[in-house]
């Protein structure tokens, strides 16, 4: 069975992260550099998250079955929330280590070898980010987008580490290393917020973005045989978009005609985003019954309370 590009991307990223962990961890422990150690810990978490993402994508790609009739696409959102949480924890640990070094005033050694290692790390991470961004663009996969964003933050943090090490080497002011480490930690925590937010919004069935919803509404409304529409609802699980709506047709229309109209509307909606699957559920109405439906919905809600 051929491996999907998403799963292949997670294997590549986890392999690269493993290599970077080994190099950075050895130098970070040997040199006492908080900035290098922070980068090593971040790469270690990258490796663990990428491995987790591999299995998350594997689950998300499973076909719907009797128990999970809409598939397991939301596993991607769960993975994104977990990844964002892990990133946040790593950032907080880096902040803690930086503050501790500032308080105790420890020194940094093996600066020159660390600079060389971090330079190599930047080149490798840059190539990995470009690869992940390419896969994310091709597949629109939330997990890969989160992974790409994560390694992008690594790229900038690695640049900051090199700047810190160069300044320490030139000035011999070792507090610079801790200050830069503190900045990296804050940046990592900040970058995690967007990943967590997107994952949570998918889990809460947030509607597709307003522009996409507007385009779907225009497609339905512009069909010459659709009198009007209402109750347009949308959501996504990260790889599949779900759309349902009521469209008003002539009361005496044949079912065959109604089905043809729905097919034409659905074909135009599919074309809005060919990178994701679509599950579209149209409902045919002989008249606009939006107020009746709302009364039934909210009436049942009130009764439950």
Image (cartoon, grey):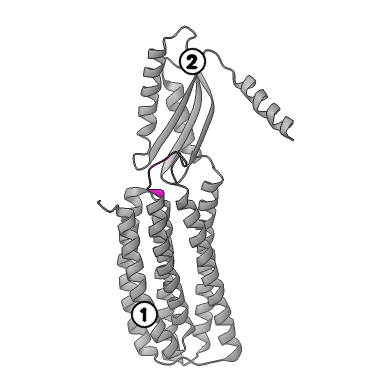
Picture layout, residue 11 above or below residue 104:
above
The residue lying toward the viewer, choosing from 128 and 55, is 55
Q: Position of residue 142 (x, y in %)?
A: 42, 52
Tell me which corner region of the image, top left, top right, bottom left or bottom right, holds residue 267: top left
Q: Could you tell which of marks 2 and 1 lies nearer the N-terminus?
A: 1
The span shown in magenta is 60-65
Q: Pointers 2 and 1 in contact (CB under 8 A)?
A: no
Which percent across, then down, holds residue 304? 72, 33
Residue 45 in the image: x percent, y percent? 45, 70
- The correct choice, above or below, for 48 with respect to 77 in the image is below
Q: Is residue 125 visible?
A: no
**Residue for badge 1:** 22
For the question of whether residue 81 can be seen, the reply is: yes
How far across and down, in percent of the image, does residue 107 sit?
A: 50, 93
Q: Residue at x 39, y 18 (%)?
A: 259
Left or right: 8 with respect to 80? left
* SS category of the residue bearing label 1: helix
Point 42% across, 13% down: residue: 255
Figure quadrant of residue 231:
top right
Does the magenta segment cover residue 63? yes
Mark 2 or 1: the one toward you:
1
- Residue at (30, 52) in percent of width and height: 4
Name, please, the residue furthest toward the front. 66
Which dot marks residue 40?
none
Q: How far apart in space, not on screen, are marks 2 and 1 (Cα)?
A: 65 Å
Find residue 128 and report its image quarter.
Answer: bottom left
Q: Within the magenta stretch, is there residue 293?
A: no
Q: Is residue 91 left or right of residue 31?
A: right
| Main secondary structure along the magenta-highlighted residues | loop
Query: Which residue is labeled 2 in the image?
Result: 227
Label 2 secondary element: loop
């Amino acid at each position: 069975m051929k491996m999907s590009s998403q799963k292949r991307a997670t294997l590549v990223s986890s392999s690269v992260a493993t290599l970077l962990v080994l190099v950075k961890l050895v130098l970070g422990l040997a040199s006492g550099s908080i900035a290098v150690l922070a980068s090593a810990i971040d790469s270690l978490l990258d490796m663990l998250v990428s491995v987790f993402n591999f299995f998350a994508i594997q689950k998300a790609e499973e076909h719907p079955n009797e128990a999970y009739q809409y598939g397991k696409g939301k596993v991607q959102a769960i993975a994104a929330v977990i990844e964002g949480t892990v990133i946040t924890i790593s950032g907080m640990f880096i902040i803690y280590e930086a503050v501790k070094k500032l308080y105790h005033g420890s020194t940094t050694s093996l600066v020159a070898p660390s600079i060389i290692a971090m330079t190599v790390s930047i080149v490798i991470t840059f190539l990995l980010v470009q690869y992940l961004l390419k896969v994310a663009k091709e597949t629109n996969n939330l997990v890969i987008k989160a992974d790409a964003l994560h390694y992008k933050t690594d790229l900038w943090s690695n640049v900051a580490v090199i700047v810190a090490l160069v300044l320490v080497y030139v000035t011999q002011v070792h507090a610079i290393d801790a200050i830069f480490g503190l900045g990296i930690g804050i940046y990592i925590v900040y970058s995690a917020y967007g990943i967590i937010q997107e994952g949570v919004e998918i889990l809460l069935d947030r509607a597709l973005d307003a522009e996409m919803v507007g385009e779907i509404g225009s497609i339905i409304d512009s069909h010459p045989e659709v009198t009007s529409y209402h109750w347009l609802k949308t959501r996504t699980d990260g790889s599949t978009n779900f759309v349902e709506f009521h469209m008003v047709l002539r009361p005496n229309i044949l079912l065959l005609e109604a089905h043809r109209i729905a097919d034409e509307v659905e074909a135009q909606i599919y074309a809005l985003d060919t990178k994701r699957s679509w599950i579209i559920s149209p409902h045919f109405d002989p008249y606009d019954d939006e107020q009746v439906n709302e009364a039934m919905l909210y009436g049942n809600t009130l009764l439950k309370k």
